[in-house]
Image (spheres, rainbow, N blue to C red):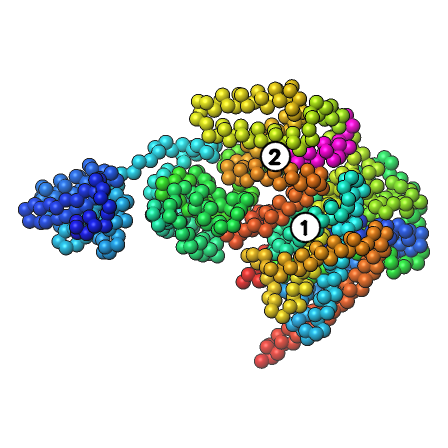
Amino acid sequence: MINRILTLFADSKDLITKRMKNDDTYMEIAYIDSLCDESKISEGIFVPFSRNKKPFHDIVQFSSEFKPVHEMTEWSSSLLRGYVLIYIHSKYYSYDASRIIRVESQTTQVESSIQGPQIALTEDLKDGLNLIRNRYPEPSLSVEERTIGTVTKTRIALLFDSRRVNSKVLANVRSKLLEVNMETLHSAGELVKYLSGNRKHLFPTMLITERPDRISNNLAKGKIVLLIHGSMFGIILPVTFFDFMNSMDDRYESYWMSHALMIMRYISVFLTITLPALYIAIVSYNPELFRVQLAFSIAGSRSAVPYPSFVEVLVMLFMIEMLVEASVRLPRYIGSTGTTVGGLILGQAAQQAGLVSSIMIIVTSVVAITNFVIPNNAMSIAIRFMKYPLIVLAIFYGITGVVIGMFSYCVYLGSLRSFGVPYFRLPGKLIPSEEGDLGQVSSS
Amino acid sequence: MNRYFYYGFLYVALINIMLFVPNILLQNRYTGSISSMALAIPAGTLLALLFASSITKFPGKAIPEIMYEHHPRWLVSPVLWMMAIVYFLGSVIVLVAFSVVINRFYNPDTSSAVVLYLLIAASVYYSTRSTLSLLFILEMMIIINAPLIFFVLGKALFSSSFNWDAIRTVANYIRVRPNIESFAAATYIFSGYLNMSMVNRALPPNFRLKYRWLIPLIGTIALLSSVFIPIGFHGTEGVEEYLFVWSVTADSMKMEYGFIERVLFLYLILYLNLTLLFTTFGWHQAMEFIKSTFKSHTPKLDEDKTTRSNWIIGIAFAVITALYSLAVNEKLNFNIAAVWLIVRLFVELLAVVWLFILSYKQVRRTRTKRKEGNEE
């Protein structure tokens, strides 16, 4: 066996091969040193083999830790996952001795919640499954495992409640997973990009989450969850636009407050998309839209500004985007410096220097703050982009352009599908007694 | 799924302003429009109910599928083309009218043609989407715009400068004999039920139209408000002087609080949305009618990808609309609208009666089949 393995692998120092013999048995083992836990190997193999209280061959045969390997093609993949390959009595076995380095901290970082559960998924697939199984103790929970990536051979798990899942969606997801053809897979985002096809999507059609409680909720709703070994995030699909506007806290707080917050979020989305475009449209095309006093004060604050409104908007938006981008990428210690400097420039100096009007500063900050209200990061980024096409339309067409642009966004959202499920459709029914659904006749 | 019927009904009832329905009715206000309106309410309701109850006998089928099933191709195809042209022309009239409105009230500096081209481009994109997507969009747009509708309506009715006497004076002309022009214009309010001719594909098999009282209610409110509110603001004689009478009416209202002072802007935003919605559905239905006359065509509710035939027909529509706008001025567009309203009434009558006969046959056939089955 050893000779064959040595020909399979490139010359590497951490590939350990040994031929061993005790009183009665001869054994060959091979493993990759850097992937394995040495203590596990000595406990499970070296010690019982050398002591030989019980014939080692019997242990290998009866213990569930040793799994028989039938195909030679499995050798390299199991070695590369941290398994030890054993050749004994002309049979091959593998023994799991893998050592995985992972982030130990298990509190939620991206989707924080105030009073909800604080635990997040981990980078190990098994631990992730453990967390979900604990929160969703249903016998109908089905787990399928696959590997994706010709080089990385990342393990992923496909979870769904077999009683509640929509079989059409499931078949769609399975066939798409089979089609995935990529070399490396490290994060949930990569898989999402591949699954949504090569079309250039603006909106996320899958929800990336780190919260086991969210995953459990969605499993109960009949959705499908993908977990990736080595990534702290799971993927939930199919989703609608409205799922992205939910934070988990909405379920844990009182009815009226959480609904008021929800309405506020939609208003913020509307503001963050339209405000810069409306500023251009109103200042350059229809100042008479506002009441007279307001129109005068806007014109007054713009009196020192030497260029048209759209230059002003583009300059300020460029500044704020840079500020957001910088504060994300900077290490935490320098981050606060960046925001202070940026805030000073944006808030005070630019206006006093007569480069931008004071109203524009309010517009810019409203746009930035309202964008942070969106609870999901992927959606937040999509919406951050949405204001730019509207600005272009506002430059050429004024308010008409903005309204047409918003209508176009609605149409685009309405024609999107997440794995066959409409993306921008109001959830639920208006009248509870209503029977049937659209499209039943033709789809059946 | 009744709501989808009423959404379709509502936006068509509201778009009447862009089809010059109030202008036609106001021109004839002393010569028979009031009695025509009084007649149109029961007539329109009857047509809507007949059509809705007939088409639900054919679950999941649109007009072309139903007709091709019962009649030979050479008879049906020209009828479908005619319906497509009627639908398409209606949207073209609205688009051109609204581009002029934008030019007059929003952007007086830019030419109306530039705005029209943007509207056309947007409409091509919208109308090529699948029928199912358009239904979701319809629901969304109605929900987004409903507050605006109620706001403008309420603002008008509770305005202090609203003159109820003028309305009463005009309403007294109800004894004058009705004429066909006004009658056709007034029945237009109810013609939203024709959306069912395509939307029926999407409706579930057990669909029955409920809340039928909503049809006369919505229709009456829309009809009365679109005619009488301008009279209330401009008086019995003044209303005649404007081509875009409702824009001027909206501009007579004022909001005392808030950022925006003139109701006109809210009204224009509302009608921009409604115009786009109307054109989207008009073009989409015309497109579906034309496509259904092709031999190789199989109707699909929700294609994965926009088909090439959709794009080709959409672009053809766009070119025709642009040419129409070059050839036609506002006055001519108004006259064409008046003729279109009358022609539409007869096409609608034809469609309703035809469908009613077919559904009657269908019901009788299933009944005799059932009887035979029982006897055996």
Please tell me how crowded label 2 is: few (under 14), some (14-19), or many (20+) other residues with Cα within 10 Å.
many
The residue positioned 47% from the left and 24% from the top of the image is A335
Closer to us: A430 or A203? A203
Q: Which residue is mark 1?
A: B121
Residue A79 shows which numbered tag?
A: none
As drawn, is B271 to the left or to the right of A328? right
Q: Are marks 2 and 1 on the same chain?
A: no
- Residue furthest to the left in view is A23
Q: Are marks 2 and 1 in contact (CB under 8 Å)?
A: no
Q: Which residue is mark 2?
A: A272
Image coordinates for residue B376, horizontal then vertical, percent: 58, 80
**Dot 1 falls on which chain?**
B
The residue positioned 14% from the left and 48% from the top of the image is A28
Is residue A278 magenta-colored? yes
- Residue furthest to the bottom in view is B376
Q: The N terminus of chain B appears in which quarter of the rendering?
A: bottom right
Quarter residue B352 falls in: bottom right
Visible residue check, residue B164: no
Q: Gap between marks 2 and 1, in whole Å?
A: 25 Å
The residue positioned 49% from the left and 28% from the top of the image is A327
Range drawn in magenta? A274-294
Badge 2 marks a residue whose secondary structure is helix
As drawn, is A437 to the left or to the right of A105? right
Residue kind at label 2, given as amino acid type: Thr
The residue positioned 50% from the left and 37% from the top of the image is A377
